[in-house]
Structure formats: structure tokens, C-alpha cells
Image (cartoon, rainbow, N blue to C red):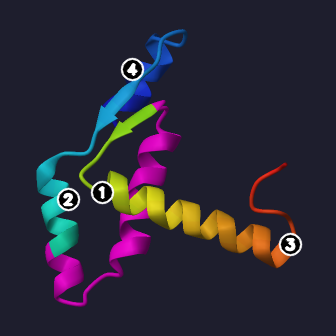
Amino acid sequence: MISSRARAIYVDVPLATYQVSGEAAMIEAAAARGWVDRESTVLETLTVIARAGADVIITYFAADAARWLSDDAASRRHREGAKAWPS
């Protein structure tokens, strides 16, 4: 992946990565046909980008990913008995 090579060279600067529209379209098409689970597939692709060294990820799925991650964090806090926000 190009991002991991860029991260290895430019270690002291923020690295932004863009998830191309073709990848987003393939995920949407596969999910619409029931071939993949949309949420888990999107989150997996974003995880791969982050593991490659991206500090910022630009994606068509930004709003959905933010909601899924926020909901997941809230669920974890609820299961662990923690407050939603510190006072």
C-alpha cells in the first residue's frame, strides 16, 4: 500500500489517505446484493487504511463510520457501567 511506504519515509508529518469512489461503490454494490455486511466491511477497510499509517482518512462513509463507532463506544460504556461523559 502506498500509504505505508509514505509513512515509512515521512514519519514526522500527518498522512491523509483518500478511500477512492470505486472502492466505496464496490462495497455498496456487494452489500446491496447481500454478499457482504456493509458496516463490518466499511470498518475493516478503514482499519486497514489506519494500520497502513494514515492519520486522517477521507471517505464517503465518514458519517456512517462516525455513528457506528460512537454507538459502539456508547454500548461498551453502558456494558461496563461507565458514565457516557465525565462530569
Q: Can you identify the residue that label 1 sits on?
A: 61
Q: CA distance from mark 4 to mark 1?
A: 23 Å
Quadrant assignment for the N terminus: top left
Q: Predominant secondary structure in magenta?
A: helix
Mark closer to the chain start, 3 or 4: 4
The magenta stretch is 29-55
Towards the viewer: 42 or 71: 71
Q: CA distance from mark 1 to mark 2?
A: 8 Å
Q: Nearer the viewer, mark 4 or mark 2?
A: 2
Mark closer to the chain start, 1 or 2: 2
Towards the viewer: 42 or 8: 42
Q: Nearer the viewer, mark 3 or mark 4?
A: 3
Mark closer to the chain start, 3 or 1: 1
Rendered view: 12 above or below 69: above
Q: Is 40 left, or right, of 85 in this rendering?
A: left
The amino acid marked with disc number 1 is Phe
Q: Can you identify the residue that label 4 sits on?
A: 6
Mark closer to the chain start, 4 or 2: 4
The amino acid marked with disc number 2 is Ala
Q: Can you identify the residue that label 2 sits on?
A: 24
Tag shown at residue 80? 3
Q: Nearer the viewer, mark 4 or mark 1?
A: 1
- 1 is within the stretch colored magenta: no
Tell me the residue at 41%/52% (across/down): 46
Q: Secondary structure at mark 3?
A: helix
Tag shown at residue 70? none
Q: Position of residue 15 (x, y in %)?
A: 41, 23
Q: CA distance from mark 3 to mark 2?
A: 34 Å
Mark closer to the chain start, 3 or 2: 2
Q: Are marks 1 and 2 in contact (CB under 8 Å)?
A: yes
Task: Estimate how packed mark 2 is, as few (under 14), some (14 to 19) or many (20 or more) residues with alpha carbons within 10 Å.
Answer: some
Q: Secondary structure at mark 2?
A: helix
